[in-house]
Image (cartoon, rainbow, N blue to C red):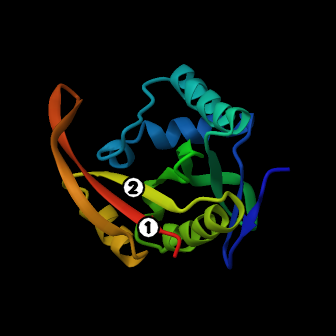
């Protein structure tokens, strides 16, 4: 059974096939993907992302939630979750994105703590890692707010859009 999580305003539910349009809308929006490692250039590419979410669950390598308002459970406004679960070392990577119309409204501030709590209490995870492109000041502020610790930057560690990018590494430990 997929763990639905409920907050004051939000329902975090399983990503389902009819969400593909919303996933495409989000992951093709320039404001969303500016600092995000995944983008969809076509509706078909969004189908690959849907398969990624399904495979995480099937292979027990992660879990992602659709972020919706409780009174509009069919309307995705973003997504958040975990991937790259390493059971041996009890760690995984967190990710999140939100449609621009909802930036600055405290949506992820409300959505992320319950998934962190779920990871620490139900998934036997000790360490949650976040990888952030340099320049993404909103995400670094957000991670600080959630008590993640900055661990360092890997300079020019990946290529995105034909240019080298540097990645910051952050972590939150289950103490």
Q: Is mark 2 on a helix, strand or loop?
A: strand
Please tell me whether mark 2 or mark 1 is closer to you in this view: 1
Q: Residues within 10 Å of mark 2 (few under 14, many from 20)?
A: many
Q: Kindly identify the residue that appears in the image at 51 percent across and 53 percent down.
A: 91
Mark 2, residue position: 130
Q: Kindly identify the residue that appears in the image at 73 percent across and 65 percent down.
A: 5
Which circle marks residue 172 in the picture? Answer: 1
- Residue projecting furthest to the right: 1
Image vertical order of residue 28 relative to residue 81, above or below:
above
Which circle marks residue 117 in the picture? Answer: none
Residue 34, image x, y percentages: 29, 45
The foreground one among 126 and 116 is 126
Residue 88 quadrant? top right
Q: Kindly identify the residue that appears in the image at 77 percent across and 60 percent down.
A: 4
The foreground one among 146 and 105 is 146
Q: In this view, does 153 lie to the left or right of 119?
A: left
Q: Tell me whether the residue at label 2 lies in contact with that at label 1, contact meaning CB atoms closer than 8 angstroms.
A: yes
The foreground one among 46 and 112 is 112
Image vertical order of residue 74 relative to residue 165, above or below:
below
Q: Residues within 10 Å of mark 1 (few under 14, many from 20)?
A: some
Q: Is mark 1 on a helix, strand or loop?
A: strand
Q: Kindly identify the residue that appears in the image at 77 percent across and 57 percent down.
A: 3
Count how many numbered circles sit on residues in the image: 2
- Residue projecting furthest to the front: 88
Q: What is the C-alpha distance between the residues marked 2 and 1? A: 8 Å
The foreground one among 4 and 84 is 84
Image vertical order of residue 89 relative to residue 11, above or below:
above
Q: Is residue 168 left or right of residue 77?
A: left
Residue 6, image x, y percentages: 73, 70
Residue 129, image x, y percentages: 42, 56
């Amino acid at each position: 059974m997929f763990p639905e999580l409920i907050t004051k305003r939000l329902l975090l539910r399983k990503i389902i096939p009819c969400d593909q349009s919303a996933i495409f809308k989000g992951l093709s929006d320039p404001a969303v993907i500016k600092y995000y490692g995944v983008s969809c250039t076509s509706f078909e590419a969004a189908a690959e992302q849907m398969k990624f979410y399904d495979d995480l669950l099937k292979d027990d390598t992660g879990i992602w939630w659709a972020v919706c308002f409780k009174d509009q459970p069919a309307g995705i406004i973003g997504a958040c979750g975990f991937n790259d679960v390493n059971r041996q070392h009890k760690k995984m990577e967190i990710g999140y994105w939100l449609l621009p119309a909802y930036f600055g409204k405290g949506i992820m501030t409300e959505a992320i703590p319950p998934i962190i709590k779920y990871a620490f209490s139900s998934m036997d995870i000790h360490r949650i890692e976040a990888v952030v492109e340099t320049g993404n000041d909103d995400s670094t502020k957000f991670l600080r707010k959630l008590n993640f610790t900055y661990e360092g930057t890997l300079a020019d560690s990946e290529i995105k859009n034909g240019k080298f990018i540097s990645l910051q590494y952050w972590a939150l430990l289950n103490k």
